[in-house]
Image: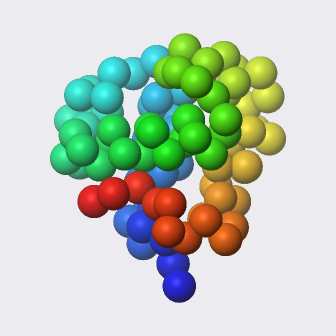
Amino acid sequence: MQVYWEKTGVLGPIYLLASKGVAEHDISTRLRLPPSTVRGCVDWLLSFLQISDREGLVLYAGNVPHAREQKVMDAGSSDMVDEGCPN
């Protein structure tokens, strides 16, 4: 069973933009997604990566971008199926 972001492919792009400090409203506009989807995915990322806020996400992503991005991309194959981003 695929999780939400595997079906839609939104988690990676949201992670990349959020980790660059792009505001959720701007992410929503750029990716043509509902703001609630972006907010849900950002919340999920913060929870999954055990980060407390958006600033922490920017710092986290800036440390080792390629390895950290892969962790997010691999999250779709984890057993966290019921905790996906809302649509």
Look at 42% across and 67% down and name the residue there. Answer: 4
Quadrant of the rendering where the C terminus is positioned = bottom left
Number of callouts in the render? Answer: 0
Query: Is residue 55 placed above or below 14 in the rendered structure?
Result: above
User: Picture coordinates of residue 29 (x, y %)?
Assistant: 21, 35
Q: Nearer the viewer, residue 63 or 30?
A: 63
- The residue at 63%/28% (across/down) is 51
What's the coloring here? Answer: rainbow
Q: Which corner quadrant of the image does residue 8 belong to?
A: bottom left
In the displayed structure, 5 sits above or below 63; it is: below
Give the side of residue 4 with respect to residue 64, left or right: left
Frontmost residue, 58 versus 84: 84
State left or right for residue 13 relative to residue 26.
right
Place of residue 61 in the rendered image (x, y in percent of width and height, measured from the top left):
67, 27
Relative image position of residue 82 (x, y in whole percent): 50, 68
Left or right of 62, for residue 1: left
What residue lies at 66% left-to-right and 39% top-to-bottom?
49
Residue positioned 33% across, 21% down in the render = 23
Image position of 58 with respect to 41: above or below: above
Q: In the rendering, at what x and y percent does residue 68 appear?
A: 74, 39
Can residue 20 be seen here? The reply is no
Q: Residue furthest bottom?
A: 1
Looking at the image, is 52 positioned above or below residue 72?
Answer: above
Residue 37 located left or right of residue 59 = left
In front here: 62 or 57? Answer: 57
Residue 50 visible here? yes
